[in-house]
């Protein structure tokens, strides 16, 4: 190219644009503060009364060696062993599902894509069901569910690759096939399950709940979600390009196979981790990216962190409802669906009327 | 062919979906030249462009493109409401690392091309809400932002009205003349080739493609066999300008 190197004049509109985008740049720290506040508030929510001051004192006693908590031993147990792991799990799950959903929607250039599309959710769901059926719980269940989740994305990759090439359509169809297979397998497992002990356990687990999550679950969630989300975020600009379509992305110089499989694998890790620890929680990965786009536009560099933070806050609030609305625990997946479906209907109509999405 | 050729295609054959789509295609384009590719629907014009960009591999013959290519696909919508700036920034893919994102310098380069094309006011508009002509210019800016040496465009004037065709065609001529860019574009309007092309490639449904300097290749006879429709040359009275247009009905022989 023989054109002159960029002139200094470009700096002027750049500064103006920064100013205009200032709102979008301020949003992530704002949401982070909101998330921390919501987390603190959530610890105080529940049947056993614990004040914010007590919570802070309990947490402080862990951070500062030698500091004595003024709270009672029961309060400390409630905060540390019951509520905190659950809150951390809700935050990680909401964060992970929303980021995975946003990345997959970009990759498949379809805003109606959910992390379940690549078959991982159904695969991990079957793994967990199988574990319960076989009487395996704890780390055994986690391992089997996670293993089946990852295995199903490998099967999807194998089915979708014809003659060394993979089309996005084949990926979606292979995801549908694998999901359908595992859905049938889950039905068989339910049929074989002891209807008084295991069947309720399977059904409840599949509906999605983090009621029994402990620090072991939180650790698995963190290991599955944090690195995966980081990798997805690093690929933010490549996701923008991939959303133009693979041939165009290739012509622009993007290594499409690398980007695609990295994102699919990262999403598979996130989904497998979520399902293994907490069952199937739908609609978060589908809806949260839309909420984020409404705030910051389509650029994935801005959408991914905002979607993640909104997802975390959302799931935390939903879980607060799940554990306090009635005397019995409501499965999380039921509430996310009850809220997610109508919100999604509104988004669909908005998309249609604003020309924000045009299918191919 | 000339030693200074930026694009050299010799006896090229490309297969797609098991079928030989392009066969025995030969053409050379010098630096700063403009190649117009003409042919009926489905003769492999887009396939040829994808081969020039390196997305498809040539199977038969030789192909050499000097320097980086920038590709402008046919007019498209995107799935998300990206701004015009977001779209044009994607052209920086080769300069931004796999895990990177565009920096200030990338924004500056895009803005430079937006100014060059007189579309700086579109920067923050939503791409999908722009008119066809505006979208075409944004995508050309995307290709230019890759700092390419060869600009490859797939039917840049299709779906555009006369005024926008004029804008795009003038822009291509200017990029070649003032910035030394080599341009390759496909079109269904021989008029575009008459106006700005230095070389022309005619692609037939079967058999070898006919390529060469515009004066040698572009004439009523070749165009008539290319489109399988009688095509005549029309000279504008009182001017040395002319065009080619299809002739329907009676009197076709006279015009030839």
Image: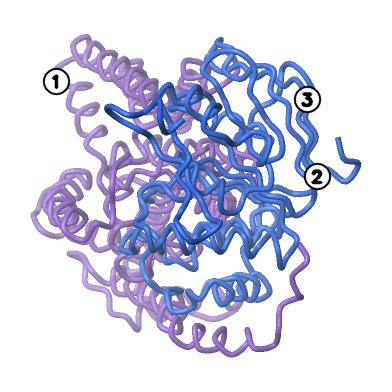
Q: How many numbered marks are there? A: 3
Which chain appears purple? A
The residue mark sitting in front, 3 or 1, is: 3
- Describe the element under mark 3 as helix, strand or loop: strand
Residue placed farthest to the right in the image? Answer: B3
Query: Is residue A114 or residue B102 the one in the foreground?
Result: B102
> Residue B161, labelled with which disc?
none
Could you tell me how far apart the alpha carbons at marks 1 and 2 are, in whole angstroms?
Answer: 77 Å
**Crowd class of label 3 (few under 14; some 14 to 19; many from 20; radius 10 Å):** some
Q: In the visual, does A190 lie left or right of A294? A: left
Disc 1 target residue: A196
Disc 3 target residue: B10
Position in image of residue A291 (x %, y %): 28, 62
The answer as to whether the residues below labels 3 and 1 share one chain is: no
Query: Is residue B195 or residue B26 the one in the foreground?
Result: B195
Which chain appears blue? B
Disc 2 target residue: B6
Query: Is residue A133 or residue B78 the one in the foreground?
Result: B78
């Amino acid at each position: 190219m023989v054109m002159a190197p960029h002139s200094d004049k470009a700096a002027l509109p750049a500064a103006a644009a920064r100013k205009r985008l200032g709102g979008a740049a301020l949003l992530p720290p704002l949401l982070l503060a909101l998330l921390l506040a919501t987390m603190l508030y959530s610890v105080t929510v529940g049947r056993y009364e614990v004040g914010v001051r007590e919570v802070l004192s309990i947490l402080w006693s862990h951070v500062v060696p030698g500091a004595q908590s003024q709270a009672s031993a029961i309060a400390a147990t409630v905060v540390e062993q019951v509520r905190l792991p659950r809150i951390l799990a809700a935050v990680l799950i909401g964060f992970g599902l929303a980021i995975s959903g946003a990345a997959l929607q970009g990759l498949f250039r379809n805003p109606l894509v959910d992390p379940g599309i690549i078959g991982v959710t159904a695969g991990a769901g079957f793994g967990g069901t199988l574990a319960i059926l076989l009487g395996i719980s704890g780390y055994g269940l986690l391992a089997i569910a996670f293993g089946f989740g990852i295995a199903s994305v490998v099967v999807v990759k194998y089915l979708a690759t014809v003659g060394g090439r993979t089309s996005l359509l084949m990926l979606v169809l292979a995801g549908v096939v694998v999901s359908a297979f595992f859905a049938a397998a889950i039905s068989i497992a339910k049929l074989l399950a002891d209807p008084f002990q295991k069947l309720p356990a399977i059904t409840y687990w599949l509906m999605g709940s983090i009621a029994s999550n402990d620090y072991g679950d939180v650790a698995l969630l963190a290991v599955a979600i944090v690195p995966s989300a980081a990798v997805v975020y690093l690929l933010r600009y490549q996701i923008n390009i991939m959303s133009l379509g693979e041939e165009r992305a290739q012509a622009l110089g993007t290594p499409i196979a690398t980007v695609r499989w990295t994102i699919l694998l990262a999403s598979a890790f996130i989904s497998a981790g979520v399902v293994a620890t907490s069952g199937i929680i739908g609609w978060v990965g589908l809806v949260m990216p839309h909420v984020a786009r409404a705030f910051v536009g389509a650029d994935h560099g801005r959408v991914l962190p905002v979607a993640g933070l909104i997802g975390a806050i959302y799931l935390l609030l939903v879980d607060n409802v799940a554990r306090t609305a009635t005397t019995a625990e409501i499965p999380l997946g039921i509430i996310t669906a009850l809220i997610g479906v109508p919100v999604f209907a509104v988004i669909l109509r908005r998309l249609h009327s604003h020309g924000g999405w045009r299918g191919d | 062919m000339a030693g200074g050729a930026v694009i050299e295609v010799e006896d090229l054959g490309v297969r797609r979906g098991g079928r030989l789509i392009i066969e025995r295609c030969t053409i050379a384009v010098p630096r700063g030249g403009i190649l117009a590719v003409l042919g009926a629907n489905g003769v492999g014009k887009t396939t040829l462009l994808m081969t020039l960009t390196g997305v498809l591999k040539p199977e038969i013959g030789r192909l050499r493109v000097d320097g980086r290519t920038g590709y402008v696909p046919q007019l498209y919508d995107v799935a998300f409401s990206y701004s015009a700036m977001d779209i044009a920034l994607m052209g920086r893919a080769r300069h931004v690392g796999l895990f990177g994102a565009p920096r200030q310098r990338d924004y500056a380069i895009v803005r430079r091309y937006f100014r060059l094309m007189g579309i700086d006011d579109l920067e923050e508009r939503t791409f999908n809400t722009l008119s066809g002509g505006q979208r075409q210019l944004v995508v050309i800016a995307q290709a230019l932002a890759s700092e390419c040496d060869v600009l490859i465009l797939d039917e840049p004037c299709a779906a555009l009205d006369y005024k926008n065709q004029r804008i795009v065609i003038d822009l291509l001529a200017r990029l070649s003349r003032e910035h030394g860019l080599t341009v390759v574009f496909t079109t269904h309007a021989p008029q575009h080739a008459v106006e700005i092309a230095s070389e022309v490639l005619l692609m037939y449904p079967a058999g070898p493609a006919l390529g060469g300097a515009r004066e040698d290749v572009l004439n009523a006879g070749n165009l008539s066999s290319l489109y399988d429709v009688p095509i005549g040359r029309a000279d504008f009275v009182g001017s040395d300008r002319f065009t080619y247009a299809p002739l329907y009905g009676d009197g076709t022989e006279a015009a030839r």
